[in-house]
Image (tube, rainbow, N blue to C red):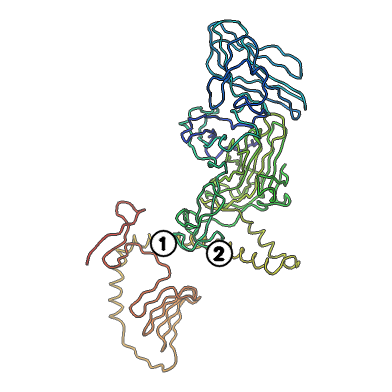
Amino acid sequence: MVASNSITVSNVNDGTITNTAWSYSADGTDRFTTVYPNLNLLDGAKDFSGTWSSSERWTNDGTYKGLTVKKRTGQWGGIFKTFTAPKDGVYTFSAYIKASGATTTIIRHRIVNGVAQTDYLIGSNFDWRIDTVTVSLKTGQTAFFRYEIYTNNADAILWTAGHKWEQGSIATPHMQSSSEVTTSDWPKYRGEYSDISSEQSTNPSNYTWSPMRGDDGKASVVHWAYSDNADGTGFTTTDNGQRYIGHYSDYTQADSTDKTKYRWADRWAKIDVGGANLIKNGGFPTNTLYWSGAMIVSQHGFYYNGQRKLFLLQTTGTAEITASTNRFEVKRNTDYTLSFYAFAESNVKNSDIYFIGRKSNETNEFTSANAIIASRRFWDLKPEYVTVTFNSGDNDNGYIRFDNNGSTDGINAVLFFGEVMLAEGSAPQKWSASYDEIAASIDSKADQTLTQEQINALNEKNQILESEMQAKASMEAFSDLEKTYQSFVKSNADGQAKAKADLIEAGRRIKLLTTQFGGLAELKTFIDTYMSSSNEGLVIGKNDASSTIKVSSDRISMFSAGKEVMYISQGVISINNGIFTTSVQIGKFRTEQYHLNADMNVIRYVGG
């Protein structure tokens, strides 16, 4: 949460809340749950294997939710297994129960650290339900619960299944213990939906479902590739500043060599233009430089097998703790994409990610707080790759804030995050150092702390970033050119008629002038253009040499910034880059804009 005097607090969806659920099927109907399961602290609970007290008095009677069901028709003699607390804390016991018999009374009996507690009356003649109870235990203390038939009736039947002990005050769906669990036991699909209601829906059809992990239990892996060709031909998995970027997701660590598996995008095009990382010290930190808040630098076995570092936010309290990035400049009403890896313990209430912004003339720390990710529960078994695109609104600068919204049980609740990348555009990008960090690394050569090979690598990264920024600037310039061209098209009809009249009049006034120059050249200069003629040909251009056209006896050339970009010679027109506004015909086929949809091109057979 964010609080201050006289500010506006909102999120990107104007008050919407993102709700999360899990399931074992793609439609969300198989074992739907709004809480992710914790591991069972009790062994043998799925099938009552191992040593269970009074098990000889119970018989097997099928399964319920994939769990072995035990059945009893006699009074007392409840089945149970004693639990020993591994450390101080709050623990929750849960089990499925069912009863039959009009006058049957079922009770829950409990003994904590050898002391019997008051029995709890559950009821009679009820269908399957989950029963839960929470207790506080010290390290080494024992406890058990058992369900029993209290009334000795001939028609009394009691069933039970899925006994579970877990840490915390919230009962989560049944799961095997750490020594028994397999990857197939975990939910396979994650669902999300957003609305403005504080009450979460239990209807699976309200959620959009996507796979969480493959059949082998691995987290989804995002693969990236780079190419100079739009179809991915000749791609590599190393970013060397190529124009096209491709990606796909699966559950295999190895990158595919099949270019067709990747979804290719022109990262120089306006929709996917990105740039340098705006977040300083966002990946593999060795300290908390440029960051503020309660985070520390840590490591975890889930993350690069504990070999790389990331940030950690941890608390035993119920209040939020936060970590904030450096402040950075943004363009108003512009899309930015944030990406990062995150995972958290299951007792983290949830997490928020904010874009905290203000205008350039404002002196408050912030005047708007947009929850770009709200009430998110990150995975607790694998690092989760998270991306979100948001709009900067009326802000000129701001920073990103990560919130750990507190512990649900008073036990240390930890949130890990790393490889924080923020760039302009709508396409997520892999983490890279910020422009300032790269520049600082290059400057540090003066201290003789880098080898020549490292300096070359840093310079190369710097040049790539500069090229990307120049490409982005070029696209913005092209946008201005496009507007000018559209204005030209609008006035072109009237202009053509006037231009023809002017040309006829100018031709009428010209008098024949013949001058012999020999090996010299004639040069005429104007305000910002010039025209010269010599034995080599006629040259017309800008005085600053930004653009030039040269006409000689065997070649017509156009130059931009001193580089030939188009020529006509020996019956061939060669153009490096071009924009055709109406149509292009090759042989008997013509490519042109579809008259019913300006966003579509068609190829027509025109004969001839």
Residue at the location (54% across, 41% down)? Answer: 213
Which residue shows up at 59% across the image and 14% down it? 72
Percent coordinates x, y for residue 409 in the rendering: 69, 29
Of 107 and 347, the residue lying toward us: 107
Closer to the camera: disc 2 or disc 1?
2
Identify the residue position indicated by label 1 in the image.
484
Mark 2 or mark 1: whose residue is earlier in sequence: 2
Task: Kindly identify the amino acid type of the residue bearing the numbered disc 1.
Answer: Thr
Category of crowding for the residue at label 2, using alpha-carbon neighbours closer than 10 angstroms: few (below 14), some (14–19), many (at least 20): some
Residue drawn 49% across and 59% down?
Answer: 244
Q: Residue at x 43, y 93 (%)?
A: 519
Give amino acid for label 2: Ser
Tally of numbered discs: 2
Residue 327 pos. (x, y %): 65, 50
Q: Measure the C-alpha gap from mark 2 to mark 1.
A: 25 Å
Task: Measuring from the top left, give residue 300's x and y in whole percent.
Answer: 69, 45
Which quarter of the image is occupied by the N terminus? top right
Q: Out of 101 and 380, give the one closest to the viewer.
A: 101
Check disc 2 and report the residue beneath it: 467
As drawn, 347 above or below 491 = above
Residue 158's spot in the image, x, y percent? Answer: 57, 14
Secondary structure type for disc 2: helix
Between 106 and 449, which is closer to the camera in this rendering? 106
